[in-house]
Every structure is written in structure tokens, then in C-alpha cells.
Amino acid sequence: MLRSRVSRNAGAQRPFVAEVVPSGATRLEAVSEDATETLDDELIDDDELASEAEGPEGLDQEALERRAAALAQVVKFGDPVLKSPASPVTDFGDELAGEADRMIGLMRDAIGVGLAATQLGVLRRMLVFQVGGEAEPTVLVNPEIEWRSEDAATAEEGCLSIPGVVVDVERPLFVRARAVDVRGEPLIVEASGLEARVIQHEVDHLDGVLMLDRTERDQRKGALRALREGGTYAPAQDEDEDQEAPTQE
Ligand code: ZN
């Protein structure tokens, strides 16, 4: 469902496993091409956040502990860094490659499919993603989405920075992103479906935009209420819809 032509640097080619959605793909369904509404900011008190993300079923104790340790390093909703735009990367090389490897490791341990540097409190334009168990992790530095399809889809998304919350987000189904790798070499990624969704979610992080800014008003309100009260939120399911696990990004 996803196709990309990506030039990867050798340092990012270690095999990483378990970068999968807990129980299958997100549900992707065709929707109208109406533009996504971006809602006004609303502040909440970060003392009131849920402190723990629930571990996906099927993880052994060691994996759960690794996940908790990784999530503890991820900046959570309420921290103003998540609303801040990141700055372009200007220094390439070993240090950046090491930082990218650290991000990939944390994404893997957290059972996420994507992670932006912003989520580690680092306001640099770098993201990693890995969609599907067989896919290699990809590092995008200074990514720009240079083309989006008019075809869009709505699917549930989760966010490692917003534990316990799932919302529906409409996004273009196909994107083309231009970026460089950790050595500064240019690369182009053409992605569709879930991979395209993850890339857009992570680029949003680099721009200080959250999935809560891109969901419908009722869901945003429900999610913010849950965050204030330390609960969880997921949109109501229609009876005839598939119920598959959302991605965690
Ligand atoms: Zn996220």
C-alpha cells in the first residue's frame, strides 16, 4: 500500500523490528476532499495529564518496560515545545546520524511508527518513520511536503505525545516529500496510505501542529476533556466500521 523511492544512508540500514501498528493497519476510508479545518489553540494545564500510556497487548514485561522508558523521554501534550516550529538542520554528519539512530531506537521501543525531533524536545527539523515490520526506518532531515493528492482519507491517529487519545484525522492519501539524509544528501519520498499519513503527522510536529488541530471540533473537545481529567478518548465507532488499532506517532 505504500511505495517510496528513497535513498537511504548506510548508517540507517540496520534492521529494526517491531515498528508495527499493534494490531494491523489503520482503517482508511474514502471521504470528501473538503479542506481540513484547523482549530484555534486551546491551552490546558499539563499537571493534569494522564501520566502513563497503556501498553499494547501482546508485549512481554521487558518490552513493556522498554516502552515505558521510551515514552518517558517523549515530550507530552501541554509542553509548549510541541507548539513551536523547529529550525532547519544545518550541521550534517556523525552527530546527526547518532541522533537519528537514537530517535529510531526510541520509536521502536515505544512501538511507534514515526517520531519527530520536536517530540524529544529538540527543535530541529528531523523525523523518523517506519511503517510495517519489513520496512526499513527512514530518516528525513529538513523535509518539505512538495505535493499532496486531492484524494483524502480519514483514519484514526494516536500520538506518542498525547497518550490515551485517538482522533479521526483527514489527510491527503498521497504525498511527495523532499528532504535530505543525515549526510545532507537529497532524497525524495513518494508515499501513500499509512506511510503518507505518518509523514504528514511528523512534518506537522516540526511545524508545531498536533493531530488535535486537525480533527473535527467535537473530537478535539472530547480529547481535551479527557486530557484535563486524566482519562482516555477515542471517537465513537459506527457499527459497520472496522475497528482496527490506530497508529502511534
Ligand atoms: Zn505525534
Image (cartoon, rainbow, N blue to C red):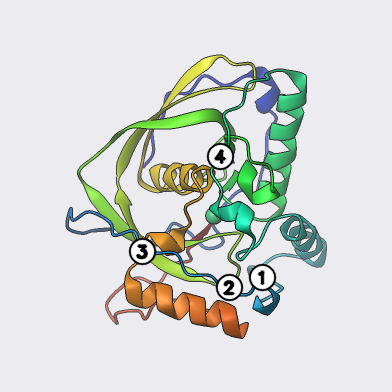
What amino acid does circle 1 point to? Ala
What amino acid does circle 2 point to? Gly
Which residue is painted at 76% across and 29% down in the image?
Answer: 98
The reply, left or right, for residue 216 in relation to residue 91 is left
Which of labels 2 and 4 is toward the front? 2
Labels 2 and 4: the sequence-earlier one:
4
Which of labels 3 and 2 is toward the front? 3
Density class for disc 4 (Cα within 10 Å; few <14, some 14-19, many ≥20) is few
What amino acid does circle 3 point to? Leu
Labels 4 and 3: the sequence-earlier one:
3
Name the one closer to the observer, 60 or 169: 169
Residue at mark 4: 134
Which of labels 4 and 3 is toward the front? 3
Residue at mark 1: 53
Which residue is painted at 80% across and 59% down in the image?
Answer: 69
Labels 3 and 2: the sequence-earlier one:
3
* Label 3: element kind: loop
